[in-house]
Amino acid sequence: MIRIGLPAGLQTAIFSVGFLLQQNLINSFGPVLIAAYTIVTRVDQFVMMPMNSFAIAITTFVGQNIGAHKLRRTEDGIMQSLILSQATTIVLVILLFTFGDNVMALFTTDLEVVSSGLTILRTLSIGYILVNTYVVLSGAVRGAGESLAPLMVSFICNVILRVSAAYLLVRLTGNSRMIFVCIASAWTLSSIFTVVYYKKVFWPRKFSAIHRDELA
């Protein structure tokens, strides 16, 4: 339980650690960006909630079906969860693009903060669609008892690469938007690495292990 549960818990915490390490960088741009970012974090929690829910559901589904040696059903369930989660996320992203300023206006009447928050939301929007794959596939992999690989992907992409790239690009350009470009880019890399791991390492290895059990 510790071997599976501890990395899974740390993986969730790493997202927050990445944002925490970037807070000093955000603070350097003054109160308008700080206020806008604070509001965006509330919206972010709302957008991430559906994909996290699908990830929790697929974790249970995969664990049960791999335990029953129903590989085809497991793979079909993972793909269907990805499609449903992706569709939900796309709808939310469209709403953010279309009504982002209205969403920001629910929290503040300051036009500068609304404008800054809208820029952040639109910068992160594509990242939401891409990170969805990482979140759901990580849940699937954890359901099969392998939680270390998603943890390593999250740590490398969302802490080391994201934070270092953000500080470097902001120093070179002086543009606060680079912080959020780095966040979306890190989510993209996380999804790419997770898809490669799932297709090339995790699934072939899991299939072979279950096939050997059946022959035994």
Image (cartoon, helix red, strand yellow):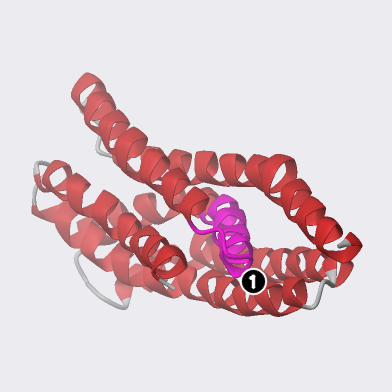
Q: Does residue 164 lie above or below 157 as drawn? A: above
Residue type highlighted by circle 1 = Thr
Question: Which residues are drawn in magenta?
Answer: 128-147
Which residue is at the far top? 172
The answer to which of 177 and 153 lies nearer the viewer is 153
Residue 57 appears at what percent x and percent y? 62, 79
Quarter of the rendering containing residue 50: bottom right
| Residue 66 left/right relative to 211 | left
Q: Does residue 44 show up magenta in the picture? A: no
The answer to which of 181 and 7 lies nearer the viewer is 7
Which residue is at the far front? 216
Quadrant where the image shows the N terminus: bottom left
Residue drawn where x is 62% and y is 79% of the image:
60
Quarter of the rendering containing residue 215: bottom right
Residue drawn where x is 74% and y is 45% of the image:
199
Residue 54 appears at what percent x and percent y? 60, 74
The residue pinned by badge 1 equals 88
Q: Does residue 146 show up magenta in the picture? A: yes
Residue drawn where x is 41% and y is 56% of the image:
121
Quadrant where the image shows the C terminus: bottom right
| Residue 172 left/right relative to 165 | left
Q: Main secondary structure of the magenta part?
A: helix
Residue 143 appears at what percent x and percent y? 61, 69
Residue 34 appears at what percent x and percent y? 16, 56
Secondary element type, mark 1: helix
